[in-house]
Image: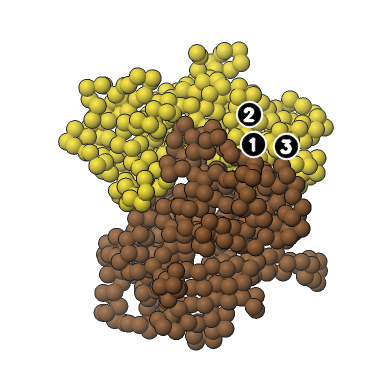
Chain colours: A yellow, B brown
Amino acid sequence: MEHLLEVDQLKTYYFTDRGVVKAVDGVSFSVEQGACIGIVGESGCGKSQTALSIMGLVSKPQGRIVGGKILYRDKNTRVTDLTTLAPNGDDYRSIRGKEIAMIFQEPMSSLSPVYTIGDQIAEAMTEHHLLSKKEAAHRAVELLKTVGIPAAEERIHDYPHQLSGGMCQRAMIAMALSCEPRLLIADEPTTALDVTIQLQILRLLKELQKRLSMGLMMITHDLGVIAEIADYVIVMYLGKVVEKGPVRKILREPKHPYTQGLLQSRPNNTAGKARLNPIKGVVPSAINPPAGCPFSTRCPRVFDKCSVLPPFAHWEEGQEAACWLYENLM
Amino acid sequence: MDNKEEKVLLEVGNLRKYFPVKHGVFRRTEGWLKAVDGVDFRLYGGETLGLVGESGCGKSTTGRLILRLTKPEPDSRILFRDNDKVVDMTKATPQELKHLRTRMQIIFQDPYASLNPWMKVGEIVAEPLVIHKVMAGKELAMKVDALLEMVGLDASYTKRYPHEFSGGQRQRIGIARALALNPTLVVCDEPVSSLDVSVQAQVINLLVDLQQSLHLSYLFIAHDLGVVRYISTRVAVMYLGRIVETGPTEEVFHSPAHPYTEALLSSMLSADPDSSQKRLQLEGDVPSPINVPPGCPFHPRCRYYQQNKWPECVRDVPALAPIHSDTHRAACHFARTLNLCGAEAEGMVNVGVKNGLNT
């Protein structure tokens, strides 16, 4: 199967006064059409920066993609390296929002408070010259119905503050879907929502992904969300991928001590009332990451070899983990 | 139960808080938002009562009312045991309140917003002790060092400012401040929901350790059912300002008696890839607490009402009545006839939905 998107050794660095932050440091993965890839990690691991790099939204002037490729295959199977396009140029703008769309984390603060929901959904469609203003307004109503907003004809005249968090997130999804993207990036789309609404939104995304045969990239810190929606998982830590593989393998047989630690930290995965087994310490500063394996400062199984960055060890079904414990499988 | 009666630390009865909804130029009151509408519960010494529910259900307001950070409606009762004396918080004078607040403290949700950025960590932790004139000088400095060490921070951090710390460390500072006056009751308002998974587990472990060593009682407010299940002795599920179900944690999670609890439990995400299939989905949003539906407040979203259209559900407000035992109570007209699904120990597994009736 040909990849919809292939990220190869992506490096996004931030050049700050205090030093260079390697937000994304040599990340590689691919997204298939009609499949969901989950990117999981704690705050500061570079998962959102990976998404912003793909969208060409790395904030200037400090942030810069300094290496690697983002290969996007369009409808005519032509492959473009997105890193070579000017972020503000016409080529990128014809892809952003139209072919690759993104749902941002906080629905309330990502929507403009001074435009109605309907206007905001219609904007992308008129901007990309797909529809006239009138047609776009009509389509906005249809989209709101698709994402399950009741009385959509009236809701399009509402402003974001008149809607609940769940409703705003649905409107964001409608906006992202307006141009029928081939790849949808969802950055923690349910983190700010209640559990019951979270399930509704995840169901909706999964259904739309199947129906429209989209590639879906789900960024989250919650392994529960991963189990619910993802087919394939990437675990990130301090800007690097530490483990990747099919969702069942990652959740059932995690190999990397970090993935194992994340799973053991979940309270509902501990049988009975046994003491929780958290990962000790905190994520180190991205300005001074540890030499070698990024997880070595917190790893319960650290040994002398960990001062060198480990390559990936391989298992069946494409599971890979960057850890010296599996040196015989490298 | 009888020997436990003596150890009731907090008893809340008919707790209500209505906020006026004002409109127009003259700010006329045009309705009331019933944030908390008749909540009753007891908290025993040394236990954790988990308060769960969706946002807007009144769980945080309940916590604030207990500490009298918000004034409850006149006929509410908040009985608090201070050593051997039982005081009604709603009738306490300002002097009494000031003293009572040494006995009850709160840990806030957002560790970034709840610490004053202009104060040093040492000053933040010392502040309750200074306000209540408990100690001063060298004794105070030593106490602050001890408090910081108790929550797993280095005593040398007293000279630093909050921005120098991570979310988990800030939450530890908040915990040290809450424990400075040796309270017996700590209201934990979503204490771990803004933290990363691995740090969350560290803070939960800390809270459990402190509870055991200091014999604290927690009112643990959270929306994360996994965390609540882990830490709570008993749980109370709130919906639109009322408690709809309460009971021992495992009993409620295994055999919920209210359809809302069932729906809430089945929305819990598990990291088990095999359990993701069979779920009950709750449709729609929580209705506005300004226009609470008549009868059972949950009936517009209740799948059993939708199937059966029972007239009672629209007509009468169900009382919180005992189900399996006196401790497990649910506010549903059909709690005894419905056979609801619980959550398995390993997250949520919902095999073969037993919908419909037993009888």
Depth check: B143 or A272 in front?
A: A272
* Mark 2 lies on residue: A208
* Residue bearing mark 1: A173
Q: What kind of element bears circle 1? A: helix
Q: Are marks 3 and 1 on the same chain?
A: yes
Callout 3 secondary element: helix
The numbered mark at residue B62 is: none
Q: Outermost residue, left direction? A: A304
Tell me the amino acid under the disc marked 1: Ile
Return the x and y of residue A122 as percentages of the image width and height. 74, 35
| Outermost residue toward the front in this view | B359
**Residues at discs 3 and 2 both on one chain:** yes
Residue nearer the viewer, B271 or B123: B271
Contact check, label 1 and label 2, Cβ < 8 Å: yes
For residue B253, above or below residue A123? below
Q: Which mark is residue A144?
A: 3
Chain to which the residue tagged by mark 1 belongs:
A
For numbered disc 2, what is the local secondary structure?
helix
Quarter occupied by residue B134: bottom left
Q: CA gap, disc 3 to disc 1? A: 9 Å
Amino acid of disc 2: Leu
Residue drawn at x 56%, y 22% as measured from the top left: A34
Single out the mark in the foreground, 1 or 2.
Answer: 2
| Residue at the image position 68 percent from the left and 65 percent from the top | B34
Looking at the picture, tell me which residue is in the foreground, B271 or A233: B271
Q: Earlier in the sequence, mark 1 or mark 2?
A: 1
